Amino acid sequence: MNTAPVVGVVTLTDPRQTAHARAREEYLSKEHSGFVACLRSHGITVVDPASSMKLGSGSCVGVRSSKEVRECAQAMQAADVEAIIICLWHWTEPALALEISKLVDRPVLLYTEDDPDWAGATALTAVGASLWEAAPNYYSCVHQRIRSDREGVLQWIRGAAASARLRQANLLLWGGSYGLRMEHLRDDYATLKRRFVRDIIEEDQYVLVRYAERILEDQPERIKATMSWLQAGGAKIEPDGQMFTIDILRHQIALYLAARDRVSELEKSIGIDGVSVRCQPELSNMYGFTPCLIPSFLAYGEDSEGSRVPYPVVCEGDVKWCARAMSKALSHPS
């Protein structure tokens, strides 16, 4: 999988043949090529559809017609871009940008440079107003505008790409949400699935308990190996005979290994991108063991059994924080 953000970049131009048309196109060409090169130098995968199209007449480099917009949109859709940047180095017809936003339903950034010789700032305002007024989709309403700040563009791209990948993510909740009557853990799953994640999958904590009991009974060597691995890494195991005993540690390790096994199974069928486990009150009060080793180790790429896929993990069905953790992980895939 390509971990670099994939962004479509389109420069729009003034369809009118004005007296300074040649100078305008030369300026657009210079700014566009420099902008694309800047993004690529920072590891961004840029889809530049107009670079392979014959635009307008003569030396035109900017997109100027609805036909050209549709061709650019088709190319960006085929490349499955995660976001689009519409460059407005000079005045253009706002309807062209509106059509791009309508055809390519992705996060939208309007960008220009503050050059007093060209009407980029004016185009930025007019195009932005048209996106708000017509509002063909959600992203047109929440589009962003940036002037003369390429570092800001890179930050926006990372966020937009993370958001796009988050919308393809599956979140697994063991025990569901809303632990210990904490209202801030309640959430609207339908809204989350509509805007932020692909799916939210719930399993009862009994799945973990059942898997853990099998490990305790049939695979005790895995638990012993994990304890040895912890000690080899410098962990001190000092039971107090009350809150912490060797039996408690064995059950916690078994619950962690159970989570590891179950996530690996689901990864093969539906894919899992983030995990939450609710320990209160069922696991702690009724089963007698908290699953604290799950968030302690599942979020890392190596454990006693070798390398594996790390997963963002939170407790008690805190969906908001799990989505936030997944977003952070997806924006920095390395």
Image (spheres, rainbow, N blue to C red):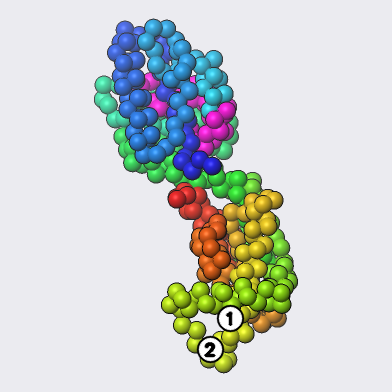
Q: Of 23 and 78, which appears nearest the observer?
A: 78
Q: Quadrant of residue 120?
A: top left
Q: Which residues are magenta?
A: 77-106
Q: Is residue 280 visible?
A: no
Residue occupied by mark 2: 239
249, above or below 150, in the image: below
Residue 111 pos. (x, y %): 39, 32
Quarter in which the N terminus is drawn: top right
Residue 102 located within the stretch drawn in magenta: yes
Residue type (three-letter) at the residue carrying disc 1: Leu
321, above or below 290, in the image: above
Judged from the image, the secondary structure of the residue bearing numbered disc 1 is helix
Q: Of 131 and 64, which appears nearest the observer?
A: 64
158, above or below 174, in the image: above
Residue occupied by mark 1: 249
Q: Residue at x 64, y 58 (%)?
A: 264
Residue 25 pos. (x, y %): 34, 15
